[in-house]
Image (cartoon, rainbow, N blue to C red):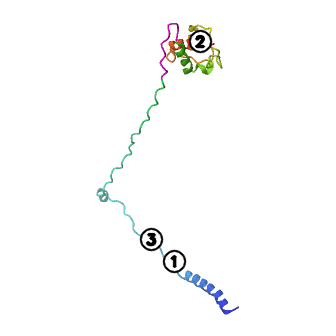
Amino acid sequence: MTTTLRALLVAPLLLLAACTSQAAATPPPSVATPTTTIAPPTATSIATATPLPPTPTPTEEPTATPEPPPPPAAAPAPAPAAAAGGNAASGRQWFAVFGCANCHGATGGGLIGPKVANTALSFGEVLSQLRSPRQSMSPFDPSVLSDNQVRDIYAFLKTLR
């Protein structure tokens, strides 16, 4: 081996050895620890202490109350019932508005409910069936479906074939 190559290999080893021996010889720096102590409060120090401001109490900000939903839309005003027993044009509207067509069909031919087109029932029998149904039909209270509205629906049913 050449001298230059040997010097290049030995030099780093010597530096490493020097760093290690110097680190072992030098103690780590000491850390200073505080030596002050806090004395307990005395009656004088308590009496002369500045009082803390009162702790604010959380206050609830007024929250906006949601507006109530609008009332359900009122059913359209019925046309005046004809003297002969009701207005068929208004009855057609009531038949749709009150959902009669859902069970009896748009033309009264029957779906899950019976056929009501050109019914053979009297107005009184139809009214009785609406107020106190015999089968699975939902009842219609007079506050929901008036007698005049039923009369209009009955007139409409009589026009269906």
Question: What kind of residue is marked 2?
Answer: Thr
Q: Main secondary structure of the magenta part?
A: loop
Kind of element beneath mark 2:
helix
User: What segment is highlighted magenta in the picture?
Assistant: 74-86
Q: Tell me which residue sits at (49%, 20%) in the image.
A: 76
Name the residue tied to disc 2.
159
Quadrant housing residue 140 = top right
Q: Would you say residue 42 sits in the magenta stretch?
A: no
The count of marks equals: 3
Quadrant housing residue 101 = top right
* First in residue order: circle 1 vs circle 2: 1
On screen, residue 36 above or below 29: above
Question: What kind of residue is marked 3?
Answer: Thr
Residue 110: x, y in percent?
65, 17
Tell me if 37 is positioned left or right of 115 in this view: left
The disc label shown at residue 111, or none: none
On screen, residue 96 above or below 15: above
Name the residue tied to disc 1.
28
Quadrant housing residue 38 = bottom left
Is 19 in front, or is 85?
Answer: 85
Name the residue tied to disc 3.
33
